[in-house]
Image (cartoon, rainbow, N blue to C red):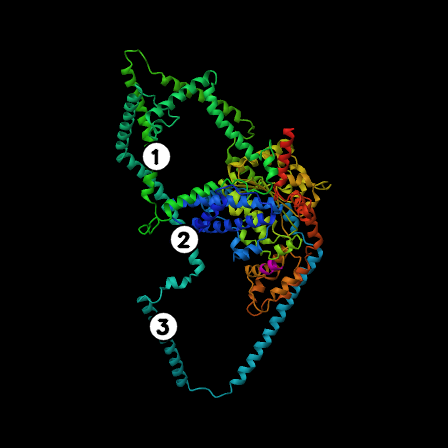
Amino acid sequence: MSHGTYNQLWREANSTINDLLVQEVPAEPPKPEKDRLTVFQKLATLYIKYVQIFRKLESSYDQIVHPQKRRILRQVLDGTMGRLLEVKDEMVNLEFSEFHYFDDILSDLKLTPNDIEIPIPKYFLYERKKVLLDREQLLGKILSKMGPTVKDSDREAKKMSFEEAIRLVQIHERARQGRLRAKFMREIRLEEEREKLAAQRGAPTLDPDLAATRIQKIWKGFVQRKVTRREREEEMVFIGMVPGKEVKTKKITPQAFAEKTEADRHITQEENEVEYQQALVTIKEKIRQVEGPDIKETMQDQIRQWFIECRDATGKFPDYPDEEDGGSALLFKEKTPEEVEAELKAKEEDKGKKKGKKGKKSGKKSGKKKKGKKSGKKGKKGKKGDGDEEEEEPGWKMQESKFIPAVSEAHNNFESIWKNRDEAGNFQQKHDGVLIKEDKRVEVESEIRVQVDELMREELNNLKMALDRDKGKKGKKGKKSGKKKKKKGKKSGKKGKKGKKDKDLTADRTIESLYEEMVQQGVLVKCPQVWLKEYIGDYSYLGTTLRQADIEPMPSLSDVRQLVALYGILPLGSQVVHENIPQIKSLLLAGPRGVGKKMLMQAICTETGANLFDLTAENIAGKYPGKSGLSMLIHMVTKVAKQLQPSVVFIGDAEKTFVKKAPKGDKTDPKRLKKDLPKVLKGFKPEDRILLVGTSRSPFDSELKPFVKTYEKIVLIPRPDYASRFILWKHVIMAHGGILTNHLDISSLTKITDGYTQGHIVEAVKYILSERRISQLPKKPLGAVEFVSPLARIDPIYKEEEEAFKSWFGKTPLGKKRAKLAKGGDEEEDGGGGKKGKKGKKGKKGKKKKK
């Protein structure tokens, strides 16, 4: 697509943002909503619109090559991501459920489920490709030094049971007999052909001369036709009617051509960015050389004029503003000399009184500001002291957003600069020098102003000394400013001492050495490349209907995929988003065997380019023994993870860490991290892009309270439903070399595999589609019956196991709230809209304080 197409996408996204800003930032504060259904409809509509904006902005940012446009796009893209996560958090707090269904809203907006699929921004990996490449090379070197490692589990897996050995012998014996039979049948067929040829020899033969003439005729005709065809092709290529042989033989598909165009745009982005960075330096230097002297003279003339006006008005020369107050920039505001002089005198009086008694006038001015801050804090906390407003106006209110100001600023920049800008002459979409000049002129003026301030301070002191020489007055302000600077230095030194609290156990070691040691110990592992789009699953089309019938549906695989993108990938990929959203430190993926828990964890690492630390009990068994060894392991993991962000800390079979009773013969010590894991999570700060990911196939075996406290977000992964299995069978068969024909009844195959997971289906397809079977596909098409025998050897996931997961999730805090809401708890919390519980507690505290 062209540059105009992506610019048009940006315009459409901004027009939608303009409509949403009117709703998000109303002129008057909205009244609290009391109807929960109305609130959900409002939030769901907001969510869907932000997803649409996000999709348009992501594709635009990925392909727009203009360096200045990309900076504004990046700001609004990160802001939209953050706002999307904030709206999602509001919906979770309202419905007490991680999964939501928008069937009715999608039909009203005439959208499909694909339109609300969460995209993964490509800049997560593209802008860090050099770092990721260097890290991959370093990891490869370390692993090559170590050589191939064979685990005990792999050795045990090679052992064969007696039944499997008998089956293998039978297969080979049948193959031997089949080869002998094929050889015997081939000999019989050849013998029959010999007999037929012998019977035909008695027929009359053709004259040799006539036969030779006929052969020559056929051969010369074939050669001439071949030469004519070649000459015709050469002629068509020569006149430009047909592309050359090089282009013709490649057979470029539209998909490949689109991918090539996108890759070319990325190269153009890099070239334009380099030119833009060079232009920033050259244009700034040019402005300093050409316009710098005039700017300096103009500033000096203005400041001298201010000296004269102040002297004429007050009878003496004024005091020069300090650097802290902005220097001479303070003078060029729209104020009279008398006002400026009065402000400077007031500041001097305040400073003098603060040193001695902390006087009344300064106290009044600062007191007003402090009171404002206190009242603001009370407003954020819900006014604990007086709960009158909450009682008078109960209901749901949208929390204040941290991303709306950034989105609004980027939107205003687009409206003022790029919306109506004529770019007819900028076909290659390179940087705009006029905008650079406007920005750099301000920078040059501020730099020159500092130099001018130093010169004019000296000139003012000389004027004062010359004027007051007879009276014996001397300027004292240089000393005062010097003392202030010294005091500031002392304060900053004290702060630095307070900041050092944690002991660094590896202060004498570099990050590279720690990285290498963890790779050698198998704690830092290489993650296989798995993309989130490879997790196949369809949308749940009956979710809203079931909930209206008071039936809690199981989430679909599409919902699971979107939750992993929202909670795992987007916060880890963007530093701005991670620092400002409600922090998600840990994520638990719970579900039966074969539903793709580990695949989703690997997709998080792949999509964000994160390091993978494997702290599974089996992996760290026997490594770093004792308490000191465990503390060293945790310290090394957290230190390397913080230095090489983003990072994922993985714990497989997470329920074993909090198991009630560890098995007697288990040598892995699964409860080793039980006490230290919550402490590690507390040490994660908003600026640390680290995520703890746990997987569990039997979470009901663990202690509920510590398990749920450790993992903040729990994603329950069910068995695939009919729609997901139908798509999955098609995708897996084609991915493993199969061909879909009318002989293969996918619908029947989907129905009989109810209860089987994605892993079971992949295992059955791999077993059937061997190299020999793929080679026979043109003559012998695939049939649904072939997949029945390998599936019969696998135990499916029964409903009892799925019900056990549902009952366990019902015991979690979010599950209890959801159950209470379903039973009619919303009548008690009707005014709160899902958040009244928190506010109600604060209101009670306020009443107690009043008493």
Q: Quadrant of residue 503?
A: top right
Instruction: Identify whether 749 is placed above or below 429.
Output: below
Mark 1 surroundings: few (<14), some (14-19) or many (≥20) residues within 10 A: some
To which residue does mark 3 refer? 229
In the picture of the structure, the residue carrying the numbered disc 1 is 443
Is residue 656 shown above or below 484? Answer: below
Q: Amino acid at mark 3?
A: Arg
Point out the residue furthest to the front here: 392
| Number of numbered markers | 3
Q: Residue at x 64, y 54 (%)?
A: 548
Which residue matches tag 2?
8
Q: Is residue 521 left or right of residue 133?
A: right
Magenta stretch, main secondary structure class:
helix
Which of pointers 3 and 1 indicates the residue nearer the eye?
Answer: 1
Secondary element under disc 1, as helix, strand or loop, is helix
Dividing the picture into quadrants, the one containing residue 504 is top right
Q: Is residue 42 left or right of residue 254?
A: right
